[in-house]
Image (spheres, helix red, strand yellow):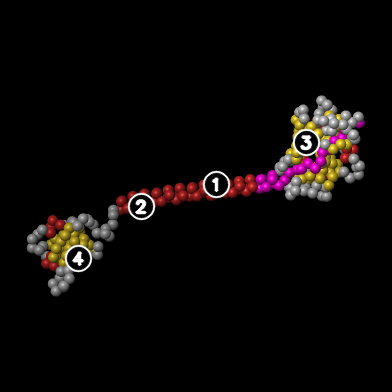
Amino acid sequence: MVKRYMEKLVGKYCKIVTKEPGEERANVVTGILEDVDYKDGFILVDSSQGLGCLRIDTIIAIKPGKKHRPENTNITEDEEAAVGIGTLIVFIAMILVAAVAASVIIQTAENLQQRAYAVGKQTIRDVSSGLQVIEVTGYTDVNKTKIQYLAIAISPRAGSLDIDLNRTLVYLKLNNFSVLSLNNALKVSSNGYTSIFHALNLSQLNGTNYGIISIHDRDDSIMKTNGMSATDQAIFLVNLSAVLPETGGLLAGEVLEGTLVPDFGGSGVFVAQAPMAFKYQVCEL
């Protein structure tokens, strides 16, 4: 090790093999060769264990490597800060994107759940509720030439929710199309009347409204609130002479189509055909 070739390796990362006198095995030290002191016979090495000296006469071999700094050598402060800020920005951006996506998914799921619940509830209500027509009866004029008044017996369908008669419309179709709504002033109970056609002043009915006679109403809901529960029955009275002003009523053999439309649920449909000859003033259609 007298030749001064080690000066060429100063500043380089080297693998240094040493063997002390009397030792059987050689030792290996890796690090940057910082300085060579031929006068005192030492080299200065910056290794992973720190800065240290090795005796030149114990060195067996030196091999330069590709690594230029020890594993524990820190990068510069500026480089560390730049990498840290970039990583932090990416991390925050990922969190924000994930939060927005999660919020959108949760909000969409809640909206779909609420919408599905509302649609299901409305579908069940519309399918299970509604009105049905029990019977349609006509009342003729004195000369028995035409039907002047119509009585439509109705009841809610089985399992129906309460029906608001104030929002129930009657559609009538013959030569024209008429829409009738409830006249709250023409609403009575059937108790004490021998004939439903004499329970109301039918002349007060016009071509745009109908009257009601409560037939079966235990809680008196029809008379008080126009509400018809599942066990109630009622009769709609219609002034056909006002609905059909051209003929003054339903003539013999004519067919009248009608639909009872509640605010929700199924509609009650009927087809009333006047007989060819009227035997009595009251006739079934």
Lateral position of residue 101 relative to residue 144, left or right:
left
Disc 4 vs disc 1: which is toward the camera? 1
Residue type highlighted by circle 1 = Thr
Residue drawn at x 91%, y 42% is: 194
Task: Find numbered disc 1 in the image and state the secondary structure of the residue it sits on.
Answer: helix
User: Would you place residue 11 above or below residue 222 in this image?
Assistant: below
Q: Is residue 63 visible?
A: yes
| Mark 2, residue position | 84
Q: Earlier in the sequence, mark 1 or mark 3?
A: 1
Q: Is residue 37 above or below residue 261?
A: below
Q: Which residues are magenta?
A: 121-142
Which mark is nearer the camera, 4 or 3? 3
**Residue 103 is covered by the magenta coloring:** no
- Of all residues, the one furthest to the left in this rendering is 2
> Looking at the image, which is closer to me, 161 or 251?
251
Residue 271: mark = 3
Nearest to viewer (mark 2 / mark 1): 1
Neighbourhood count class around disc 3 (C-alpha, 10 Å): few under 14, some 14–19, many 20 upward: some
* Amino acid type of the residue tagged 3 in the rendering: Val
Which residue is identified by label 4? 28
Mark 2 and mark 3: span between their CA atoms? 83 Å
Task: Look at the image and tell me whether residue 181 can be seen.
Answer: no
Residue 75's mark?
none
